Image (cartoon, helix red, strand yellow):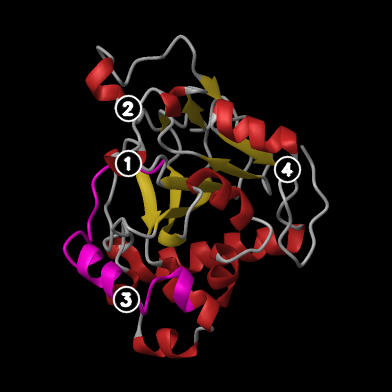
Amino acid sequence: MMRIMSTQEFTLTQQEQRQLDEEGYVILRDFLSPARLEALRQRCEEIYAAQGDSAGAEYRQEPQTRRLANLVNCGELFEQLVSDPNLLPYVRHVIKDEIKLSSLNFRSANPHSDWTQPLHCDVGAVPDEKGFWICNTIWLLDDFTADNGTTRFVPGSHKVGQLPEKVLADASAPHPDEQLLLEKAGTVVVMNTHMWHGATANRTANHRRALHSFYCRWDKPQQQYQKELLSREVQDRLSPSLRKLLALDDPLNDELSSKFSRASGFMK
């Protein structure tokens, strides 16, 4: 579904609410303007070139994959991304409580790779007594095709309440109900990532790039402890609303996240 974006937060349509509730995802086509898309592509490549072998080390490195982590520390372009007023209402609909940024990562599937992620729930999370507590957003920097390492997902599996590796004989094998995310660059996909999902192999000659802006409920640890990772210079210039979204002044988050700075689980 295509929506006309505004500078103010809006209310989801009933169709979007049903899609998120029942299927576990919603697709926002043409969310990124061509200029914003190209700026994000260029900036990610610059950061990766500058970081070299240490790229992604703040979180994890992955076979046959380029990664970047701690991207809020890398400029206003990423600060605007995680706080986009046209995105956060979707995240709040999934989590239905106060949210905070858990991490902002870049993932690029290498050309001619054979690495397929097993189906998983992000950070190994299952819903608790309060309900769903994680939501990931995929910002497509390239087209996602059947051959270039797109995401596969099992619609409705966010309601199963179990991790796929505990249920399936082989979480890396094709699932009879899985679908492939086949969308154009500039699309953003909001996913309740209690839903089973995973990246596929990139059999093409080009990188397949995406950003993942990942959110969690206020009473859970961040995947990447923002207060520890962000430079003092960046923290000092952030607006009050961004500081709140990043949980920079939250004593509970300090207690939770300082003990849990490298969460387990894949991010597509």
Give the percent coordinates (x, y) of residue 52: 33, 65
Label 1 CA crowd tier, 10 Å (few <14, some 14–19, many 20+): some
Residue that numbered label 3 is attached to: 227
Please report contact status of discs 1 and 2: CB closer than 8 Å, yes or no: yes
Secondary structure mostly seen in magenta is loop
Between the C-alphas of marks 4 and 3, the distance is 33 Å
Name the foreground residue: 42 vs 83: 83
Q: Quadrant of the N terminus?
A: top right
Please report contact status of discs 3 and 1: CB closer than 8 Å, yes or no: no
Residue 29 is tagged as 4
Give, as a single range, the part of the protein colored magenta. 243-268
Three-letter code, disc 4 = Arg
Between the C-alphas of marks 2 and 4, the distance is 27 Å
Residue that numbered label 2 is attached to: 118
Kindly tell me whether residue 144 is visible in this rendering: no
Mark 1 vs 4, N-terminal side:
4
Residue that numbered label 1 is attached to: 266
Mark 3 secondary-structure assignment: helix
Mark 2 vs 4, N-terminal side:
4
* Image position of 237 (left or right of 220): right
Three-letter code, disc 3 = Lys
Q: Residue 250 lies in magenta, yes or no?
A: yes
Between the C-alphas of marks 1 and 4, the distance is 25 Å
Foreground label between 2 and 3: 3
Give the percent coordinates (x, y) of residue 2: 79, 42
